[in-house]
Amino acid sequence: MKQFICIMCPKGCHLSVDEQNDYAVTGYSCAKGIKYGKAEATNPVRVVTSTVVVEGGQRNRVPVKTADGIPKTEVIDAMKVINQVHLKSPVHIGDVVVKDLLGTGIDVVATANM
Ligand code: SF4
């Protein structure tokens, strides 16, 4: 049995996931908890947020994030890639900063104009 705290809303339900019983989830207060609990037990993913260097903007760095969750096990390597990115202004919200991050099929995109 694996234990998780659901992070899909501030209520923070304490979930139990039974790997021996088709990943049955208990402890949830809504359906989001079922989906979150199964995903955490089978293939946990995280949206990565960070900043990258930008030249010629009002500030030295621009915020970025992965367009969707990437496998939790790839987060450290993802940060190594993101930390090597250097952009030149102008940068627009939604611009792809890294295409297909680590072969995940997920892009890193800018989340601000600069
Ligand atoms: S199970 Fe539903 S109510 Fe409970 S923390 Fe998750 S999203 Fe919120």
Image (tube, rainbow, N blue to C red):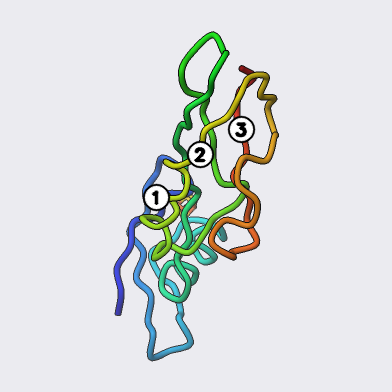
Q: Position of residue 93 (x, y in %)?
A: 68, 27
Q: Amino acid at mark 1?
A: Lys
Residue linked to disc 2 = 85
Q: Amino acid at mark 3?
A: Ala
Query: Does residue 11 appear to the left or right of 34 in the view shown?
Result: left
Q: Residue furthest top?
A: 58
Query: Does residue 3 appear to the left or right of 36 in the view shown?
Result: left
Q: State the residue at coordinates (46%, 17%).
A: 60
- N-terminal of the two: label 3 or label 1? 1
Q: How many marks?
A: 3
Residue closest to the eye, 101 or 65: 101
Q: Nearer the viewer, mark 2 or mark 3?
A: 2
- Quarter of the picture containing the C terminus is top right
- N-terminal of the two: label 2 or label 1? 1
Q: Considering the numbered disc 3 on the image, is that residue within a helix, a strand or a loop? A: strand
Residue linked to disc 3 = 110
Q: Residues within 10 Å of mark 3 (few under 14, many from 20)?
A: many
Q: Position of residue 68 (x, y in %)?
A: 60, 51
**Distance from the alpha carbon under mark 2 to that under mark 1:** 9 Å
Q: State the residue at coordinates (70%, 34%).
A: 94
Where 39 sits versus 14, above or below?
below
Q: Considering the numbered disc 1 on the image, is that residue within a helix, a strand or a loop? A: helix
